[in-house]
Amino acid sequence: MLFRPLIDLLFPPLCHACKGAIPVTGAEGTPPQPFICAGCLGKISFLESPLCTLCGAPFATDAGSDHVCGACLSHSPFHTCRSAAVLGGPLQDLIHRFKYGGKMHLGDPLGLLAWQRLERFIAQARPDCVVPVPLHRRRLRQRGYNQSQLIGEVLGKKLGVPQVVGNLSRLRWTEPQTGLDAGDRVTNVKGAFGVREPEALAGKRLLLVDDVFTTGSTLGACVDALREVEVAAVVAVTVARGLQQ
């Protein structure tokens, strides 16, 4: 766009987190993506190795190689899972406004943030399609959109693969997971998901997308449903991960 540099100079883009102006940088005079300023990015704790090679949980040590964690040695619901950053600070505020404040436009910066941090992991998984964690139709009516689907749209476009919406579905209403302990979370979502058209997903490699990983119970229940239709692999990604104390 011919006048884009001038427009950005007169009306600089604002940080989605702090609302401060973002200086225009780069040879083409374009603002840095995903429209989160350097100060706010510096307050986000991005997840780095060493991590569990299955569930993606970070280890307490500052150095070392990735390996399977104790929980996954006994049982892991995932083929593999990764999150971009720890749930906290500016990222937690962004996700809260996105999920509960009706700020649909935040799906783009959150999706881009996940892509920038997890691009190599996602590309190596070679998914055939993106599958967002579905909402129950009642909650979808209440919220007006599925936050996981909006993040999945960004990842699907970056990958150049379709997003499959509606095939993986919620079979029954579940209470919000917030406030439940790990055991209750598993019970709450057990058997809550199903696949409407198994033949459409059988044998495919899937990228399962959600906004937040807390205990992994929701993602695990989705993976259980997908495994029943004999998919080739399920790789799960989330923007944020809540660390258990």
Image (cartoon, rainbow, N blue to C red):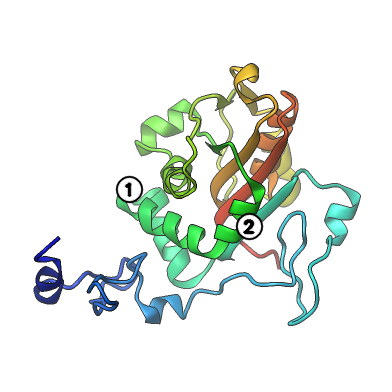
Badge 1 amino acid: Met
Please tell me whether mark 2 sits on a helix, a strand or a loop.
Answer: helix
**Mark 1 against mark 2, which lies toward the viewer?**
2
Residue 121 disc label: 2
Cα separation between marks 1 and 2:
26 Å
Looking at the figure, which quarter contains the N terminus?
bottom left
Q: Residue at x 42, y 32 (%)?
A: 140
Say whether disc 1 or disc 2 marks the residue closer to the N-terminus: 1
Residue 156 numbered mark, or none: none
Tell me the SS state at disc 1: helix
In the image, residue 28 sits, relative to residue 182, either above or below, namely below
Q: Is residue 240 visible?
A: no
Horizontal and vertical percent position of residue 225: 70, 29
What residue did someone put label 1 on? 104
Q: Name the amino acid, label 2.
A: Phe
Rendered image quadrant of residue 48:
bottom right
Total numbered labels placed on residues in the image = 2
| Most foreground residue, 95 or 162 | 162
